[in-house]
Image (cartoon, rainbow, N blue to C red):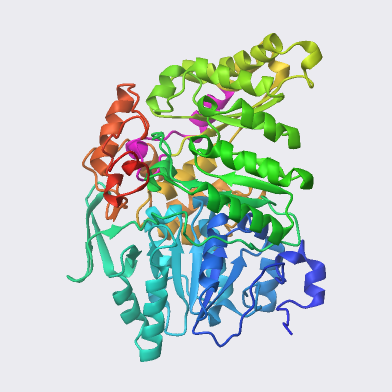
Amino acid sequence: MRKLALNDEILLSIEKPARYIGGEVNAIMKSRDVAIRFAMCFPDVYEIGMSHLGIQILYDMFNRRDDVWCERIYSPWVDLDKVLREKHIPLFALESQDPIKDFDFLGITLQYEMCYTNILQILDLSGIPLDASERGEDCPIVIGGGPCAYNPEPIAEFFDLFYIGEGETVYDPLLDLYKECKQSGASRQEFLRRAAHIPGIYVPSLYTVTYKEDGTIASFTPIEEEIPETVEKQVQMDVTNAPYPEAPVVPYIKVTQDRVVLEIQRGCIRGCRFCQAGMLYRPTREKSLEILKQHAYRMLKNTGHEEISLSSLSSSDYSELAGIVNFLIDEFQDQNINVCLPSLRIDAFSLDVMSKVQDVKKSSLTFAPEAGSQRMRNVINKGLTEEIILDGANQAFHGGWNKVKLYFMLGLPLEEEEDRKAIAHLAEKIAENYYDEIPKEQRVGKCQITVSTSFFVPKPFTPFQWARMYTPGDYLGFAKTVNHEIKDMKNQKSIRYNWHQADETLLEGIFARGDRKVAKAIRIAYENGALFDAWTEYWNYDRWVQAFADAGLDMDFYTLRERDEDEIFPWDFIRIGVTKKFLWKEWERAHAREVTPNCRQKCSGCGAAKYGGGVCMEGRE
């Protein structure tokens, strides 16, 4: 029988003890004598991490191997963090409750830059040296993966290696190599050196960086001749037959996304110039309708969930969207299963599909115009006209909805004050359409439009990676412009406005495009108490300002300057298919307000065709 790492006295003294006891439905238990023990970590609280599809996929995939036991770990909330430190209890995995330091691997998902201090918390509480160079033979191999791994440099010194790409591809060769090295008695360093030759694996300690006098990078090179100069992104081209968890772990407590998640496709055809995921996950690859039906049936059966969400960067672009929605409605109508359709584009939204989902359960619809004016929508390559947006909203209203959420960004390249005011005017026009188009007797209440703005953060491998950012005061000024304009609208009572925190945006931008020097500031901030920076109640901007000052780093260097075409970026050694030449061309097209057609309309030669499949090969012999 399992013995819990925390006694009853501790469990009764902390918030939500179910976060730490494991034993959930579909959690996988194995014998401790497997060849490889892998601790899979999401560096945020349990409720957030349990909602992450990537970890579910890897957890299922690893545990299909007889020689691997993959367990889960999440960041202890601040109450337990304090207890673990005071009582010297090492951080433990949920399934076995064993200390993380006893594992072979600690894999950390890098989903969001503002979780970086939580990574240090995980290492610290596990008794693993923060600096990878200080780890001995008895320490787990610390590996990072996920979207933030595409610029691993700000946290490079904390990791032994990074996995660049989609997890279904080369994890098996990596685990096989580790088992071989373990059995032969090879050293930790020998394993890392050999791992660096596996496509998609980046070992930071095997590369060196030099800098120019102005602080930009002069060179990035391997320390040994046989180490590859570049690291190639790994892509799972056959997403239909890729491993997928049909019996995901079901938590005891309510989590952020308490539902079955069905990934319908990977990638996006649209090419929005601000969107990192749209570039990283090219080319677009669809899953077959039949396999989706199988997954949906088995996942709902194995979990007991009453809601299923269709996961995609742009669900409307999935060619079989109507087919999968019709199946879910028809197959599970007697079970009152709710179908959630995120990531919808207004111009590709089917009224028929909307109406069928509406019959099951009412909810708000979410659209992302991203910019209020047509000029800015052309700059970011959103590919939407105001006519299309208003027509799509009208379809939603006629389909029975009266609640609409609209997402926009502020601080975009080339943005002007009139573009910000246009956000309020677009929301007003949508509200007007509701009251003009829907007769009083058919309304289900007043129109409710929620406008949310985040502040733009330039991300690696996007056409906007060369862009500058602004000061926190500038960002708040942008939000105030929108707020004041909304208050002047006739239908202001139907419009609610929320905006993001400005200074947090600035730090996210530094982490997104930072170099290896940034790690010093991250460590100083953590040692001075920074933790759960993504949570408003624990966010302390002054602490970070002091940390950068103590590290001798100028925050403005990373945020306020526009990059030159020939600047070497910290992530330039990574190859994602999409070329830097194409991204620069898109940066120039943004300045010319030119729209680039989506991948199904016309191939723009981004470079992703090198993978030989997906949307790049549609219609070809």
Q: Is residue 277 above or below residue 392?
A: below
Query: In the figure, residue 203 lies in which quadrant?
Result: bottom left
Residue 295: in magenta span:
no
Residue 133, x across and y down, in percent: 38, 74
Residue at the image position 55 percent from the left and 47 percent from the top: 542
Camera-nearest residue between 617 and 104:
617
Camera-nearest residue between 479 and 428:
428
Q: For the N terminus, give its image quadrant.
A: bottom right
Camera-nearest residue between 455 and 59:
59
Q: Is residue 228 above or below residue 347?
A: below
Q: Which residues are magenta?
A: 458-480
Residue 200, x across and y down, in percent: 34, 62
Is residue 561 in view?
no
Is residue 130 in view?
yes
Q: Is residue 147 above or below residue 85?
A: above
Q: Position of 219 compared to 434: left or right?
A: left
